Structures are given as structure tokens and as C-alpha cells.
Amino acid sequence: MARYTGPSCRQCRREGQKLFLKGERCYSVKCAVDKRAYAPGQHGQSRRTKITEYGLQLREKQKAKRFYGVLEAQFHNYFEKAAKKKGLTGENLLVMLETRLDNVVFRMGFASSRKEARQLVTHNHFTVNGKKQNIPSFEVSAGDVIKVKDKSVSTQKFKEIRDMSISTPSWISVDTDKLEGKVLAMPLREEIDTPVAEHLIVELYSK
């Protein structure tokens, strides 16, 4: 299973904004974007290039990939599937990314970042509708119930969640006592707060 293994903060600095890839660290004074608000690399501080239309489109695609933790080939596959569905391709793409199991676990508040959520899923801590599911890219559907496995509820990580006040998007409900969440409906575009201009991604792939 391919994944990015380099420094997460480097990705945020390249995009010039916080992508919140490291959870609580992104809100602290240790955040690399706050400390070094310029692109990474030897010439990061002196880079003064004019951004072209293509450059804007490319940066938007890279930003979306990094937000959701997917690589190029997988992202392209998502786009191809989104283009074949009814409705707006860009919105279809974001909905497919939002309904990845690792993202849903993150949205449920059971992980501080999507990266941590991905790790929890691959380590077999969750079930979907009562069945073990350890594939981060698994696409959930309306009505699905995501629950922490019985063998995992005693771990310190999930004990802490029971005492937390969790804010979730309107398309997800969470019961912290039972350590489970339910997908109430597929998310609408206005319910997805990821700061991505999906129409630029569509324009890029349409060239």
C-alpha cells in the first residue's frame, strides 16, 4: 500500500498554508508554517515566480491530494470515477474523498489527523457494520456504522475519547460512550469544509 513517508510539514510549507496534517502540532507554536512561512528547499525564501493558470490548477490538485493523503495514481482513479457519475465531477470527487474510511474516522473525532486515522484503520481498530475493515480507502455509504472493535476499547487512546466533547459534520453522528459513529447521509458540497477549489482540478484534467 503506497503512501507518502516524507515530512508532513514540508507539504504544508510547499502549499503555503496549514493542511493540518499533524493534528495538535498544527495548532501549536511548533507549526512549521508559522515558523518558516516560505517554500521548502535551498531557494525557498528567494523563490519569486509568477504563478500561471496551469500552476494554480496544479497546486489545487496537489493540495487536495495532501489533505486526504492519497498519491497521484489513486487520485487520478478517483477523478476518473467521479467523471463517470451523475452530477458535477468536482463535487463527486470531493464526496468520494470525504467518504474514505480514514477520513470518516478523522471526522468522527477519533483521530487528531487523517494520518493518525489511517494508521488506526490499518491496525484493525475499527469495524464497519460489524465487519472488520482495515483498508483506509474503503468507501463508506449512508447508513454505515463505524465502531471501535471490542478488543480496542480498553486502549488509552479510546478511553480518552469517551471524555471528549466532539464536534462532527452534520452528515455524521457519534456516540462517544459506545465509541461508534454513523454516516447519516452522503455529504453535500456545502458540508465539506476542505479549502479546495475543485473546479480548478477539473480544468486541469480536462486539458
Image: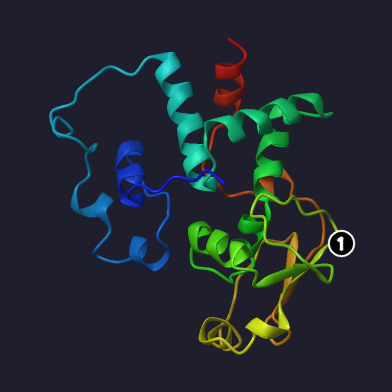
What's the residue at 35%, 47% (across, down)? 6
Which residue position is annotated with label 1?
Answer: 143
Residue 54's place in the image compared with 185, above or below, is above
Label 1 CA crowd tier, 10 Å (few <14, some 14–19, many 20+)? some
Q: Quadrant of the C terminus?
A: top right
Residue 61's x, y, as percent? 51, 30
Residue 122's place in the image compared with 61, above or below, is below
State left or right for residue 204 relative to residue 89. left
Count of picture labels: 1
Q: Which quadrant of the structure image shows residue 43?
A: top left
State left or right for residue 71 relative to residue 82. left
Q: Which residue sits furthest front?
A: 1
Residue 66's place in the image compared with 104, above or below, is above
What's the residue at 59%, 75% (across, down)? 166
Quick one: SS at disc 1? loop
Here the colouring is: rainbow
Residue 185's x, y, as percent? 82, 56
What's the residue at 56%, 59% (across, down)? 118
Q: Which residue sits furthest top?
A: 207
The answer to which of 2 and 37 lies nearer the viewer is 2
State left or right for residue 18 relative to residue 79. left
Q: Which quadrant of the structure image shows residue 104?
A: bottom right
What's the residue at 68%, 84% (across, down)? 151
Q: Which quadrant of the structure image shows residue 155?
A: bottom right
- Tell me the kind of residue under disc 1: Gly
Residue 176's x, y, as percent? 67, 82
Residue 103's x, y, as percent? 62, 56
The answer to which of 103 and 171 lies nearer the viewer is 103
